Image: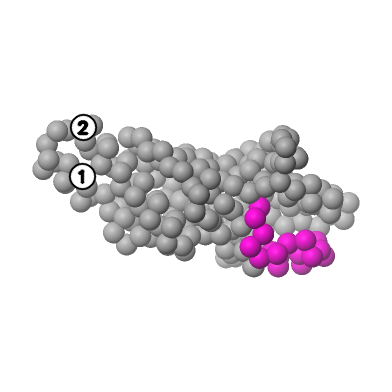
Amino acid sequence: MRALKRLLVAATATGVLVGAAAGTASAATSGSQSSQGAAVWLTGGQTTVTTAPGIAGALLKNDIVPIATLPGSEGAGSNKGGVYVQFGFPVTGGTVNLAKLTGTIDHQGGILFIDPATGKQIAVSGFDINVGQGDLTALVNGNPKVRVPLFSLGLGHAKIIVSRHAVKISGIVVRLTKTAAGALDATFGTKLFTAGLELGTATTLIRHR
């Protein structure tokens, strides 16, 4: 997704330049830092996902319970849109190449979808945001050989805040991919999930060198 690439590249590049400007007033040094900014190494942060109105209720109505797996976290609340669930996943690393517009933002933790009555379940974990593709991929049931596109990421209304060594992007729209929708429906025998279903919004805080 071009929007994701433009936003992340601009944000990370700005963060690098802010750091360089704070460290020196020399134009030559600042230029050197900028040229070295093609590869930005990520050192930490967190991505949070809050379910859209009606999503949590629809899952529970169909006896599907989403549970965060460690080191991910989970909380619930309610607002005018009804009950929502919020998941948090720590950013563990990754790189963004500003010249090639590629790279990944790596996470730990995941989500276990389970029907407690039948024992049917499917787990997704090891989330990676792929900058080049504009999506989030995940491992299925912990199998390192099975990584699938789980969410597509929309940044049409995203907001960005840049500080010296961090970038915060909020308002990212999270939608289910066709692959993920098919896997969930097949697992639970439902017709609840569809490609492009808006699951919620995400906020990503990225720390970098």
Q: Is residue 47 among what the camera can see? A: no
Q: Do the CB atoms of the residues marked 2 and 1 lie less than 8 Å apart?
A: yes
First in sequence: mark 2 or mark 1?
2
Numbered range of the magenta stretch: 181-199
Residue in the image at 40% along x and 51% along y: 8
Please indicate whether residue 64 sits to the left or right of residue 68 in the image: right
The relative height of residue 22 versus residue 59 in the rendered view (above or below) is above
Q: Is residue 158 magenta?
A: no
Indicate the amino acid at tag 2: Gly
Which residue is depicted at the point 44% across and 46% down? 93
- Give how far across and how far down residue 72 sits, in percent: 61, 41
Figure quadrant of the C terminus? top left
What amino acid does circle 1 point to?
Answer: Gln
Q: Residue at x 11, y 43 (%)?
A: 28
Q: Is residue 83 left or right of residue 12?
A: right
The crowding category of the residue bearing disc 1, from other C-alpha atoms within 10 Å (few below 14, some 14 to 19, many at least 20), is some
Q: How far apart, in angstroms, are the residues tagged by discs 2 and 1?
A: 10 Å
The part of the image, by quadrant, that contains residue 33 is top left
Quadrant in the picture for residue 207? top left
Q: Name the residue under label 2.
A: 23
Q: Position of residue 206 (x, y in %)?
A: 43, 42
Numbered label attached to residue 33: 1
In the rendered structure, the answer to whether residue 30 lies left or right of residue 170 reads left
State left or right for residue 152 relative to residue 198: left
| Residue 136 image offset from top left, x and y in percent | 54, 57
Dot 1 falls on a residue whose secondary structure is helix
Q: Which of the two residues, 77 or 119, is positioned nearer the viewer here?
A: 77
